[in-house]
């Protein structure tokens, strides 16, 4: 913490805090005594009070002594503590590492119930925050990009491309910032990331990219939004007449730094450096690190079951069964479950919890002609390097006519633009499938922050899906 706020400074501030609280208590006692004397002097039927007024503009206000000394001192103490915590966080530089969500959470905590700003509390809190600073910044960086319109996210949950788009950033009718979308704040969050990575302080709003956009838009004589461009040290921005703002990054070195941090935040849990799906349609046959295993949380499993609509006696395939999180739920819903699992220790576990049909092979090596087809397929395949697309595409071939497949996938399956993934989306659309976003952090308890979706599709009753593409 000594690198953030010197201990001597905190001790000095605590001394001022103590004096302030003591003087507030004395002020209460003095106000109570004055109010009592006021009452004896005037004998007012409604209690003591006085008026304030200056010149010809007379303002009346009645002041009565507060009746609860403990509540008064408690309120005064919290006000002092709020001011101290705000000062210390800003003086330490930690606030500049926080994204908008983190700052709002911090401010809400101070507004509701600030902890006593004693030297011991401050020291302990800042030691924790200093240790968490890298994660705070990582999370802030991830959230800054995750909040963008997902149609234009090119980072696939952990990678920034060369351009981002802020939808409906400005109002096309009057040219000002869209006060509902608040994309100016989102852009400030993105800008903050680049200043921190460049080792600089983010300037005030008017001196940054938002200020550059304001200068250009206010320079127009037309009330209706006209297309224009704005530039800063890190960005080139083109604003269109519909209010969308396209932002290009000018510093490739900082983009690479940002991607490295995002890879650590998202990709470290995936076990490999994150890459887009292979351009070719051939599946990625090299095993993922730790086989890409992240157990399906109960909340996600419940959502999969809701979509799968398993009925008693239906045959169900779980082609990446892991330790049986989805298989158990499918069995509880009445399904006759067949499991495929490549890891031998998980195969033994599945058999140990009562699954008689368990195949210990790589699912991509199996064929529906030899292995059979199923009424339902539920799955949570490995995500990295487009493996989820490979596994789900292969699994479609195992559906019976009228069958239904529900899979957990990385969010990249919905918006990556490589050929394999775009062909996959076309297939999903052809079979009436849909993508459903899962909340951010849905797999956090399993050790990964990767953004996830559920894809759900059905094969028409009169058609068997011999091949997915």
Image (cartoon, rainbow, N blue to C red):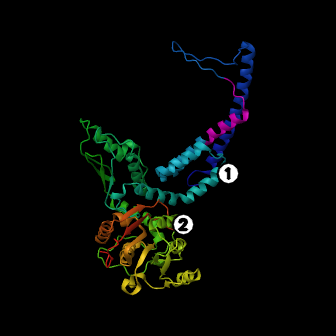
In the image shown, does 328 or 112 lie closer to the viewer? 328
Q: Is residue 2 above or below residue 444?
A: above
Say whether marks 2 and 1 touch (CB < 8 Å): no
User: Where residue 450 appears, x then y in whole percent?
Assistant: 45, 65
Instruction: Indicate the quadrant where residue 48 lies.
Output: top right
Query: Is residue 110 found inside the magenta-colored segment of the image?
Result: no
Residue 91 seen: no
In the image shown, does 339 or 361 lie closer to the viewer? 339
Mark 1 closeness class: few <14, some 14–19, many ≥20 residues within 10 Å: few
In the image shown, does 57 or 465 lie closer to the viewer? 465
Query: In the rendered view of the protein, which quadrant contains the N terminus?
Result: bottom right
**Left or right: 79 as drawn, with respect to 135:** right
Query: In the rendered view of the protein, which quadrant contains the C terminus?
Result: bottom left
Number of on-image labels: 2
In the image shown, does 335 or 293 lie closer to the viewer? 335
Q: Is residue 238 above or below residue 457?
A: above
Q: Which mark is residue 298?
A: 2
User: Where residue 260 appears, x then y in whole percent?
Assistant: 42, 65
Name the secondary structure under disc 1: helix
Q: Is residue 452 above or below residue 227?
A: below
Q: Is residue 177 above or below residue 66?
A: below
Name the secondary structure under disc 2: helix
Instruction: Indicate the quadrant where residue 266 lies.
Output: bottom left
The residue that mark 1 highlights is 120
Residue 79 seen: yes
Q: Residue at x 38, y 81 (%)?
A: 285
User: Where residue 427 appears, x then y in whole percent?
Assistant: 31, 70
Q: Nearer the viewer, mark 2 or mark 1?
A: 2
The mark nearer the N terminus, 2 or 1, is: 1
Mark 2 closeness class: few <14, some 14–19, many ≥20 residues within 10 Å: some
Q: Which residues are magenta?
A: 64-81
Instruction: Indicate the quadrant where residue 224 lies.
Output: top left
């Amino acid at each position: 913490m000594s690198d953030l706020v010197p201990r001597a400074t905190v001790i000095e501030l605590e001394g001022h805090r103590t004096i302030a609280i003591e003087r507030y208590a004395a002020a209460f006692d003095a106000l109570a005594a004055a109010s009592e004397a006021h009452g004896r002097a005037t004998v007012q039927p409604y209690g003591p009070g006085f008026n304030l007024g200056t010149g010809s503009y007379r303002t009346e206000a009645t002041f009565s002594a507060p009746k609860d000394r403990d509540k008064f001192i408690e309120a005064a103490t919290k006000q002092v503590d709020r001011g101290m915590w705000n000062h210390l966080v800003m003086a330490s530089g930690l606030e500049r590492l926080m994204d908008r969500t983190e700052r709002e959470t911090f401010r809400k905590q101070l507004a509701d119930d600030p902890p006593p700003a004693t030297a011991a509390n401050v020291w302990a809190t800042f030691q924790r925050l200093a240790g968490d600073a890298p994660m705070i910044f990582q999370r802030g960086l991830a959230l800054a990009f995750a909040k963008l319109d997902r149609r234009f996210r090119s980072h696939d949950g952990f990678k920034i491309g060369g351009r981002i788009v802020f939808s409906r950033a400005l109002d096309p009718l009057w040219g000002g910032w869209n006060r509902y979308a608040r994309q100016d704040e989102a852009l400030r969050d993105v800008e903050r990331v680049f200043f921190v990575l460049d080792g600089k302080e983010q300037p005030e709003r008017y001196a940054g990219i938002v200020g550059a956009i304001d200068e250009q838009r206010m320079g127009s004589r037309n009330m209706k939004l006209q297309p224009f461009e704005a530039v800063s040290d890190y960005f080139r921005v083109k604003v269109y007449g519909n209010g969308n703002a396209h932002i290009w990054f000018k510093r490739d070195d900082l983009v690479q730094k940002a991607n490295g941090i995002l890879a650590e935040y998202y990709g470290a849990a995936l076990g490999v450096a994150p890459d887009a799906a292979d351009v070719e349609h051939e599946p990625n046959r090299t095993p993922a690190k730790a086989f890409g295993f992240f157990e399906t949380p109960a909340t996600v499993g419940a959502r999969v079951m809701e979509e799968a609509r398993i009925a008693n006696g239906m045959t169900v395939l779980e082609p990446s069964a892991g330790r049986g999180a989805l298989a158990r739920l499918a069995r509880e819903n009445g399904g006759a479950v067949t499991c495929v699992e490549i890891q031998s220790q998980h195969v033994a576990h599945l058999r140990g919890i009562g699954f008689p049909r368990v195949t210990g092979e790589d699912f991509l090596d199996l064929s529906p002609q030899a292995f059979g087809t199923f009424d339902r397929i539920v799955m949570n395949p490995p995500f990295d390097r487009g493996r989820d697309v490979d596994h789900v595409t292969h699994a479609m071939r195992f559906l019976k006519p009228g069958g239904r497949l529900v899979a957990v996938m990385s969010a990249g399956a919905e918006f990556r633009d490589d050929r394999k993934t775009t062909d996959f989306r076309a297939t999903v659309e052809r079979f009436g499938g849909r993508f459903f976003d899962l909340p951010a952090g849905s797999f956090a308890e399993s050790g990964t922050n990767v953004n996830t979706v559920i894809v759900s599709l059905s094969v028409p009753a009169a058609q068997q899906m011999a091949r997915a593409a």
